[in-house]
Amino acid sequence: MMRKHSSHIEAGSSSCCSGTCYCSKKVKVTICVVIWTVIAVIVALILAVIIKAATLQELFERMELGARDDPVFMSATEQEILERSQRLVDAISYRTISFSGTNLSLEAMTDFGTFLERVFPNLHDSDFVTFTPINTYSRLYRIEGTEKTLNPYLLCAHMDVVPEGDFDLWTHDPFDAGIVTESDGQDYIFGRGAIDDKHAVLGIMEALEYKVVNKEQPKRTFYIGFGHDEEVSGYLGAAEISITLEKMLKDNGEELDFLLDEGMFVVADIIPGINVPLIYIGVAEKGWAVVDLDAEGDQVHSSTPPLESSIGILAHGVANMEDNKQPSMFGKGPEIDTLRYAAPHATFLLKMILGNLWLFSGLVSSALELSSQTDSIQRTTTAVTIFNAGVKENVVPSQAHAVVNHRIHPSDNLEDVLELDRENADRVKVTLRDSFPPSEVSSYSNDVIPFQIVVNSALEVFPDAKPVPGLMVANTDTFHYKNLTDKIYRFTPVYNLPEDIARFHGIDERISVDIYSKVVQFYYRLMVNADFDVKIAPTAQVEVKPEEVEEFLEILEESDYESPINNTDSNLLPLTKVMEESDENSANETDSHLMILQDIPEEPNENPSNETDSGLPPSQDILEEDFDAMPVNETYSDMLPLESAPKDLDLYDLTPEEETFSNRTID
Ligand SMILES: CCCCCCCCCCCCCCCC(=O)N[C@@H](Cc1ccccc1)C(=O)O
């Protein structure tokens, strides 16, 4: 009876209650309504998905930092490009290999330092460049800017390389290949370090040498840090550079604005359906963990093997770890914005998917899983890197040992990772040897000028590529600099197809002469773009002559004001420092006038002072706007950030003497 009844309903519903049907009219109407509602919902969903795809907007909005349409590059004749390439070839010939934390190629590193000084003599001799050796082998440069009120930035790279691995697999000698024309007709600089990371070391030096030779002293002070042991985690190089730099910044009353290190790159054809190259800027970096796996069994004669050997137990554990991967964190880290930023440049089908991640995130996560490269952006990875056991072919060993290297997704945590390891390798001793957590995510909204500086510089050399923020899936020296700034970007403009990614630490590492030329130009443009600053409105400033600075200092001395130079918590450019420097500058006729903000807004602006969210418009807009609307502690202005001045420096409540002083306008 039941079966018969239900078949009638099916028959009726298939024609939506038309024709003969035993169910009541009310039931028929209800079924009709349900069916039509379902159809309407599906149609509405499809329409919503299509409309969303059709109206996808670019998420990155380029801020004009200067000559956007006509950037001035370094001169690059064929001869100059060849000479620059040859210097990179020469750099690669130094075997600055880091084998382990205790086995570095220090003699080669010394020679490499001498090489840099020889081939870039002008920068090493320049009045505005100061070089400080760090821990003998690492290198820190300070490039003094002409304007003291802009916070400096740091460019990083590393001079060491990993070993070549299997020499016989290389098509050309990894340390002595020179420039090779490949079957695609392009000229390549071959060898270990070509993209990791001597291209960046040499690229930065080339750009700076050019600026020095052409007397282009930058406006903004910046630092360059070259580590000598990045490939073994940077504890002797970057870690020490960071300590010295922190002290230098403090002594100079500076705060680091941002830093740029190696990391991600321009990548093409990595996501099927996105047919433009992506300028992939690493805005966060995974954490790191090294885990020892130890299995035990009986040591016996191989003619009477145990049911389970130590090797078998360990092999099972390791295989389980590979089969049961750490869970996907898709949607919880910067990977979601990699796809959202790339979406407007996808095929329409992919736009429908990426434009509607609320509906398709499971599908996208499964698609990312299809390639180990794309999968690495959405989860903690597990790499079995060492596996050791046994000493003789007829002895079953009692011990087997393996090492697993995890790269931890920013939304994952070490405890959970280890718990899953222990579940997967349940009969194996799992011991954490070494770890550091994932980085914070640096801001990348459109009003973050450091992000704009990096992206604009990349766009100037790769105008057809599209910028996307994302996760750096490996590690860099930036871990050691995390206390110096919260704006850390990881990128060099190397162009990679998926097959090229395997060249990092792999076989046949290379960079084309053409791309290397872009690397050099990128760093040059970055040094130019970083000089972009927000101009102060003329009515809002008072110019003070050096002699009046003296007078002001005397007044300060008489008061109980303490210099912020010694104040570790102060994040402003110390006023006395600016004054002293202004004094010195007056001798050179550069910037002889000190600018002091006079029209201090009565109330702090509504805008959050945090520049990430401040919605600060570009300079040209600011000039046109009501000046009072500016956030008072905006880093990019030429003004002294009075809001953050120490409270005992009572600039808001002046004595009559001070008032007379501060109100004077001197031509
Ligand atoms: C959607 C697109 C996804 C693309 C994913 C592609 C992944 C490419 C990986 C490229 C790796 C470059 C790594 C260069 C830096 C490097 O070798 N670091 C090393 C050394 C190191 C170890 C610990 C701490 C600091 C440094 C490393 O990560 O092992």
Image (spheres, rainbow, N blue to C red):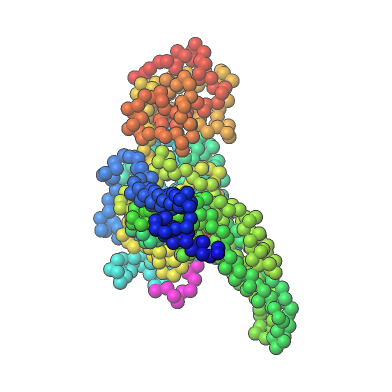
Q: Is residue 665 magenta?
A: no
Q: Report if residue 559 is visible in the image.
A: yes
Q: Residue at x 54, y 57 (%)?
A: 328
The x, y position of residue 290, in whole percent, is 61, 61
In this view of the protein, which residue sits in the foreground, 167 or 501? 501
Is 168 included in the stretch rendered in magenta?
yes
Look at 49% across and 40% down and name the residue there.
Answer: 256
Q: Quadrant of the N terminus?
A: bottom right
Which range of residues does the magenta coloring cover? 163-171
In the foreground, 56 or 465: 56
Identify whether 662 is placed above or below 316: above
Please report the residue visible at 56 percent of the width from the left and 59 percent of the height from the top.
327
Q: Residue furthest top?
A: 656
In this view, the residue in front, 119 or 211, is: 211
Coordinates of residue 609 in the picture (x, y in percent):
48, 31
Q: Is residue 114 visible?
A: no
Which residue is pictured at 45% across the width and 21% down the height?
A: 601
Image vertical order of residue 552 relative to residue 581, above or below: above
Tell me which secondary structure the magenta stretch mostly adopts.
loop
Name the image quarter holding the C terminus: top left
Residue 449 image-quadrant placement? top left
